[in-house]
Amino acid sequence: MLHAVGALESGACKYVLISYGHSARSGDSMLRMLSDMTGDEAIYGHFGAAGGYALAARRAMHEFNTGPDSWKHIAVGQRAWANLNPQAMMYDSRLTDEGYMTAKWLIEPFRLFDNCLISDGGRACIITSVERARDLKHPLVTIMGLGQHNPSGDLQKADYLAGPTGARIAGEAAFSMAGIARDDIDACQIYDCFTYTVEITLQDYGYFEPSGGKDWFMGGTIEPGGRMPVNTSGGLLSEAYHMGLTPLTEGVMQLMGRCGPRQLGPETNTKTPEIMLCSDNGGILQTHACYILRRI
Amino acid sequence: MEYAKPLPQVNADTRPFWQGCRQHLLKIQKCKNCGLLRCPPAFICPECLSSEVEWVAAKGKGRVYSFAVYHAAYQPGFQDELPYVVALVDLDEGARMITNIVGCDPGEVYCEMAVEIVWDDVNETFSIPKFRPLQK
Ligand SMILES: [Zn+2]
């Protein structure tokens, strides 16, 4: 996104397409990509992203007493959104607290529904100048703020697994550029490779103190009808895994009012959104990007 | 019986580490410029970018920084060990390494648990450093 804005601002081009497409479910390329990430950790049976995030989540349980009682609200809340989204892989599949808690362990402390999906499909979005976008058929959605922070390349050196992750500094940069405060955000689309990723990202953005997540999520905060909707397509956990484009495109579509039964506003008993926060991260919490978008 | 799990992919950076392991010595890189202990081995220091390095032997005692319990085998060689524990261990000397915790039930492992090294001689070439609860 930063590159896209740079290319547009410098006049190098007029439109930038950000796209992602993958036959990750029907082919084996996702598994090959994840096993390529694995080096000598494989000696110890440590594989892919789930193992690394499980280490991060376990450290967080130790440092600020989070755990499945917090994460169930994320898995169940996002599933409620997916149940309103006919495109979501989990559209027809309900999830209750009990269903979450009784699912099998994969890499403890993660149960099945703490993990994102593996999907076939793709996403794309086009970025252009505000002047050009004014002439297009959809409502205008602008970028208010951007921030990036990439704390480390090496899991063994990582002291941020239980936060603050890159979200802290990236979020501060994005809010500062946007000139707004956290309370101005109407809804969030958070990169959710695992449930814990949603908790630590919102925590680092300052929505709650460490260990405050469980109370913050309780009572349907992020669900349809909740006071801070999060991942309104179902997200990577319950809609489809298209990397950072799942949260980004959902943020844009919600602001444009193109989301049908899951549209934020009167249909879902939520506030009609004007300002949306989206996030993306990579590696094992090693890179982070924060975007604040606004409908004009 | 043939060893069914992945073996170290030795390269110029990691060869001294695995040679040490074969002699049951846990050798860690120490930056000669800034003193940083680093794991895994690398040809420059991530803090000061110096390529001057020495190898120091760690005592093999430390604490669990974090751990994950695998209930699924993502490689067939681990099937018989389920559930097994992968951990990040902070050595007393200061470096953090990825390893397995063995010699106890996975349910007994916790963050900050004191552990000590135990060597797994997996074939005639490699010994793999693992950790178990510190014996009294
Ligand atoms: Zn150094």
Image (cartoon, coloured by chain):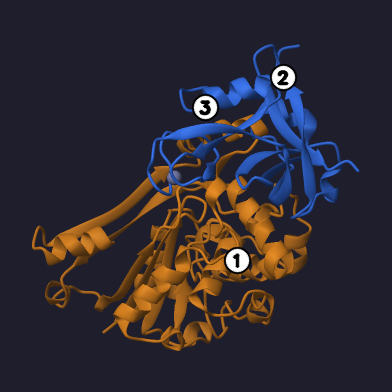
Helix, strand or loop status at disc 1 = helix
User: Which chain has been coloured orange in this picture?
Assistant: A
Task: Give the crowd class for mark 1: few <14, some 14-19, many >=20 residues within 10 Å.
Answer: many
Q: Colour of chain B?
A: blue
Task: Give the crowd class for mark 3: few <14, some 14-19, many >=20 residues within 10 Å.
Answer: some
Q: Quadrant of the N terminus of chain A?
A: bottom left
Q: Which mark is residue B122?
A: 2
Give residue B120's position: percent from left, percent from top. 75, 25
Q: Quadrant of the C terminus of chain A?
A: bottom left
Q: Nearer the viewer, mark 1 or mark 2?
A: 2
Q: Which residue is mark 3?
A: B14
The three-letter code of the residue at mark 2 reads Val
Helix, strand or loop status at disc 2 = loop
First reached walking from the N terminus: tag 2 or tag 3: 3
Q: Nearer the viewer, residue B38 or A166?
A: B38
Q: Residue at x 72, y 62 (%)?
A: A62
Q: Which residue is mark 1?
A: A79
